Image (cartoon, rainbow, N blue to C red):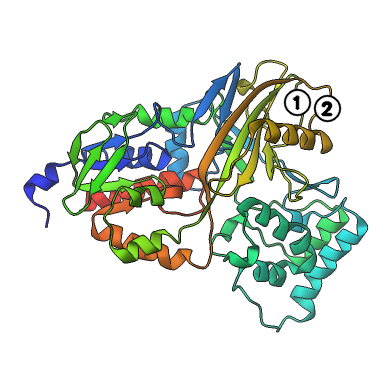
Amino acid sequence: MNSPKSRQNPVLILGGGLAGLSAAYHLKTKTSLLIEKENQVGGTARSYQVKGFTFDYTGHLLHLHFPTTKRLIKKILKNNFFWCKRDTWIFSENTYTKYPYQANTFGLPEITVDDCVVGFFETNYQNPGREKSDSNFKKWCFDTFGPGISKHFMIPYNEKLYRTKTELLNIDWCGPFVPKPRLEDVIKGGLGTENRGFGYNQNFLYPKRGGIQSLSLGLARHLKNIKLQTSVEKIDWGNKKARLSNSQVVPYSKLINTMPLPELLKVMSPLPRQIRMAAEKLKFVSIICINMGVKRPKISQKSWIYFPEKEFPFYRVGFPMNFTPHVVPRGQSSMYIEISLKPGEKYAKKVVLNRTIKGLIKCGILKKSDKISAVQFLPIKYAYVIYNQNRKMALKQIMDFLKRQGILSIGRYGAWKYSFMEEAILDGKKAAAAIIKI
């Protein structure tokens, strides 16, 4: 049981991204202190003003499924938002096809369409009683979609994104992120017949003005105790004290972490040996987000495009000016371009930019005559968690240990998972509710 003195200590929240802001917001009357190492809240849900453009850390779009989050977002943003309908494509074999690939192969070379449609049929209907495997992502793809769809898109795209062989990935992350079509969907998609919508993100909300950071700032306006440009240097988890970068020592009652899990564990040393070993098994991939402004209006009507082929350095390109016209100067366009990297991989900005522009010209997004009016490189060290065979057990060991120390680690990076913004907000709300009940 906590002593009266410990109950007076604040709930310490590490990280001012959406999960941390949501936790502080939902703690209500509970005393909390939120610390954020940057000079502004938002984490990767931040925005920048560059030469008249509003740029985010890649595509941060609000896919809302729950009434509670819809009400909260509308309350925070007031009337500063648009509802958008997803218009998403894939570029492969010099052809644009609708997303998802597995249900929209029309337009690709005939041999590819046959490979995908026939392969799906034979895999799922020719021998329905055969044993299927979900031992790894590659085998699951072949057993779910057949060899054609797997070889032409699923395997190359995911290996390009995760920089990892797909036989080393499990399928725990797939859920709503990898739609599974019916046979009739695959056949219709091969014939070019209109198909039903797929995926969790068919519609999304985006702020009219200010970029995605307008949501983070809106949440922060309801909070009283935020310390910016402050990080945690040491957590004395045995005595529930944290030493901050300003030399302040903060006793806490509970701790909510939203920092990347490996970063939290680094400042918690000394750790038990088994927890240190588990931490070494947490793997991830980094990305570079290149934000680009172009002196030409509406260079694309699309929301975003996937690129599975190796000849293109990027795996995805999105167009913020199609979410709201208020993020670009009049008569111009904007893009976010995502390139995957192994952690610590070095790159030369000039070389990457030149390769990127050549790729954008090759697929028809840019013209050789286009003038680039703004370029911004935003690296994201912890971009995607790698769901390998070690993750589940290592994560359970770590989370059980943290829970015993009164630490809740939440959000995309704190909980070490693949998730979207609504889930981060809900994670914060759940963490707050768990603490209030104590």
Q: Nearer the viewer, residue 208 or 279?
A: 279
Q: Is residue 24 visible?
A: yes
Residue 360 vertical placement versus 260 (above, below): above
Mark 1 vs mark 2: give the one in front: 2
Check disc 1 and report the residue beneath it.
298
Residue nearest the observer in this picture, 341 or 167: 341
Amino acid carrying mark 1 in the image: Lys
Q: Return the residue at label 2.
A: 367
Circle 1 sits in a helix, a strand or a loop, which is it? loop
Q: Position of residue 433 (x, y in %)?
A: 29, 49
Identify which amino acid the numbered label 2 is placed on. Lys
The residue furthest left is 4
- The residue that appears at 64% across and 25% down in the rendered structure is 375
Which mark, residue 84? none
Which residue: 52% across, 31% down?
Answer: 212
- Residue lying at 29% horizontally and 61% vertically, measured from the top left: 401
Q: Is residue 176 left or right of residue 409?
A: right
Q: Is residue 331 above or below residue 397?
A: above
Is 111 positioned to the left or the right of 135 in the image? right
* N-terminal-most mark, 1 or 2: 1
Q: Position of residue 146 (x, y in %)?
A: 76, 69
Q: Is residue 432 visible?
A: no
Question: Residue 213: percent from the left, percent from the top?
Answer: 48, 29
